[in-house]
Image (tube, rainbow, N blue to C red):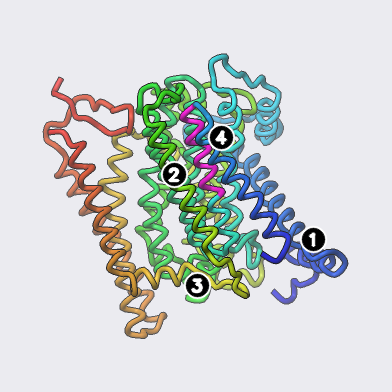
């Protein structure tokens, strides 16, 4: 992007920041550029998230309205565009009730802590070439590790509320997070096997170098990651942790006002995080087959991110909620074995490729077709197999063990 | 440990780790103890980062803060009277003896060890080297460990199976 290299050219946001840092490095102490770049990066990420949130809180409700054959919010401003601002004002001004018997310390710290892991994920995701807060060489692992910590604040919220519905919701959420972490990790491992690096910008660079997206090489992994990601961000097909028809509102039953707002906001942020990870890892991040020469990379990245978020909204509007035993069984009996086979095949392919020194142009299309066929065959065959393996004496009602979300098939009633 | 930044980071992380560890023993509420334990785990991960052990630091968060702590939380929750006072334990004397032994051992090692600081530049990435070591030189221990884990997993499934 040579012709964009002037500092005032906002099409490449890195330029003015780079100039500013150079200026500070020349005239100030050594540590100043580091501190300033960290602050600029953090503030940019938070602002981006808040603006996206305001936009998509409205877009989602309008789109859901369309899917469900109604209007959606249309009173505040033209087409209701200021609805999310009105909602934000409501969140801030409403009383944040603290019930008498809650554990105060945990009850107050949970909504604060819950946003932290989600925000931290964005630190390793590149918005454009060089536009990344911390380009860790273990980026993929970092994303997984931070995602695994999200269970703790949610658990704190559920336990401290001193409410059985909250505790049930927290239990479900934690059980879900633990179960779906495995297929998620295995799906991302396939990418690491192909790209040979865990650095996020390295993965994007690999896709750019080979003129492909990893979605073509790992179609099954994308599907698995999409499902596991939906579970992790707790959106409607899988929002059993706050299923209002079963357990009031799950772990945030007792929360109101801005404290509830933090949970709601974190859910959206987590949605953006998952879509951003998919866009970076499987859809080539800021690259679009040469278009990044003409359009700034961050616009391409954001377009992919928002497009994926539309997909999540679509899923929410069209799929019914699952039961907890269905969801857990799906993770362990379907996603996990299929992901294991997928990672095995990916490793085999890379081994064949590296050992025989084959040309990438010849090998990669072959792998793409083979993996697509494999994905289709695996899904169909494993689905059939699971259907066969289902017990013929299916219980009339599956009883839940409240501890772990496991299912006990009781006597026929 | 030459520049100010890493010294400041070390002391902050050390205070956080040790302080949280002390709180684990001091608080009476068992759930609070587990949460402080998680904080301590995260502090240790930060200490690994200051030692340029990036892979180990992230693995520490993933395994200890993410997985082991959740397991402990579940265990505490499923234990009756978990959240209440846990002071009346009959294991006080053995616990104190064990703590004293560990303290003496660590102290002795700290005194005996020759704390030379090797001259060093920037550290290389560790993830690849660890992977190669695990699958090349130490492949047998690695495989044995994974087989043991598999056996434990199957054993757990067999234990809770009811039919």
Residue A191: in sight, yes or no? yes
The first of marks 2 and 1 along the sequence is 1
Q: Report the quarter where the C terminus of chain A lies.
A: top left
**Marks 4 & 3 on one chain:** yes
Measure how far apart labels 3 and 2 are at the Cα level: 26 Å
Q: Residue at x 42, y 40 (%)?
A: B97
Write the start and end of the magenta stretch as one range: B29-43
Instruction: Please report contact status of discs 3 and 1: CB closer than 8 Å, yes or no.
Output: no
Measure how far apart labels 2 and 1 are at the Cα level: 40 Å
Residue with the mark numbered 4 = A61
**Marks 3 & 2 on one chain:** yes
Residue with the mark numbered 1 = A32
Nearest to the eye among marks 4 and 1: give it.
Answer: 1
Q: Is residue A130 above or below residue A123?
A: below
Q: Residue furthest right?
A: A27
Q: Nearer the viewer, residue A81 or A387?
A: A387
* Marking on residue A206: 3
* Marking on residue A230: 2
* Crowding at mark 1 (Cα within 10 Å: few <14, some 14-19, many 20+): some
Q: Secondary structure at mark 3?
A: helix
């Amino acid at each position: 992007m040579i012709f964009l290299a002037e500092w005032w050219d906002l099409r490449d946001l890195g330029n003015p920041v780079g100039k500013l840092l150079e200026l500070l490095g020349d005239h100030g102490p050594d540590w100043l550029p580091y501190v300033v770049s960290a602050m600029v990066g953090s503030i940019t990420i938070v602002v981006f998230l808040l603006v996206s949130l305001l936009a998509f809180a409205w877009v989602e409700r309008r789109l859901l309205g369309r899917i469900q054959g109604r209007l959606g919010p249309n009173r505040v401003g033209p087409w209701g565009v200021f609805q999310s601002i009105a909602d934000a004002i409501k969140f801030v001004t409403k009383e944040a009730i603290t019930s008498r018997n809650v554990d105060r310390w945990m009850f107050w710290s949970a909504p604060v802590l819950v946003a932290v892991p989600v925000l931290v994920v964005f630190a390793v995701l590149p918005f454009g070439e060089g536009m990344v807060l911390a380009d860790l060489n273990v980026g993929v692992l970092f994303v997984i590790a931070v995602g695994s910590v999200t269970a703790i604040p949610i658990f704190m919220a559920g336990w401290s509320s001193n409410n059985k519905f909250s505790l049930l919701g927290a239990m479900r959420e934690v059980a879900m997070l633990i179960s779906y972490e495995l297929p998620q990790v295995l799906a991302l491992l396939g990418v690491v096997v192909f790209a040979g690096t865990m650095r996020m910008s390295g993965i994007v660079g690999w896709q750019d170098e080979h003129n492909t997206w990893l979605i073509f090489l790992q179609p099954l992994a994308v599907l698995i990651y999409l499902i596991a990601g939906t579970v992790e961000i707790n959106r409607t097909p899988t929002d059993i942790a706050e299923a209002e028809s079963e357990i009031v509102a799950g772990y945030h039953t007792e929360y109101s006002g801005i404290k509830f707002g933090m949970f709601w906001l974190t859910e959206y942020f987590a949605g953006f995080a998952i879509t951003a990870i998919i866009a970076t890892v499987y859809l080539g991040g800021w690259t679009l087959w040469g278009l990044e020469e003409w359009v700034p990379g961050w616009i391409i990245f954001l377009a992919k991110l928002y497009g994926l978020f539309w997909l999540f909204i679509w899923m929410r509007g069209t799929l019914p909620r699952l039961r907890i035993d269905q969801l857990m069984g799906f993770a362990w009996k379907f996603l996990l074995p299929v992901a294991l086979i997928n990672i095995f095949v990916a490793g085999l392919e890379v081994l064949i490729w590296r050992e025989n020194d084959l040309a990438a142009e010849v090998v990669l299309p072959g792998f793409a077709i083979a993996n697509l066929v494999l994905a289709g065959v695996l899904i169909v065959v494993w689905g059939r197999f699971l259907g066969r393996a289902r017990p013929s004496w299916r219980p009339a009602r599956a009883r839940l063990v409240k501890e772990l979300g496991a299912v006990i098939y009781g006597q026929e009633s | 440990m030459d520049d100010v930044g890493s010294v400041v980071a070390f002391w902050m992380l050390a205070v956080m780790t040790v302080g949280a560890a002390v709180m684990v023993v001091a608080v009476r509420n068992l759930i609070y103890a587990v949460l402080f334990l998680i904080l301590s785990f995260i502090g240790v991960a930060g200490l690994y980062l200051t030692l340029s052990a990036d892979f180990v630091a992230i693995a520490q968060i993933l395994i200890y803060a993410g997985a082991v702590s959740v397991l402990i939380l579940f265990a505490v929750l499923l234990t009756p009277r978990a959240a209440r006072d846990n002071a009346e334990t009959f294991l006080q004397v053995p616990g104190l003896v064990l703590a004293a032994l560990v303290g003496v051992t660590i102290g002795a090692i700290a005194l005996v060890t020759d704390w030379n600081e090797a001259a060093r530049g920037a550290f290389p990435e560790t993830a690849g080297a660890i992977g190669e070591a695990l699958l090349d030189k130490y492949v047998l221990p690695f495989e044995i460990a994974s087989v043991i884990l598999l056996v434990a997993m199957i054993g757990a499934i067999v234990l809770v199976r009811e039919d």
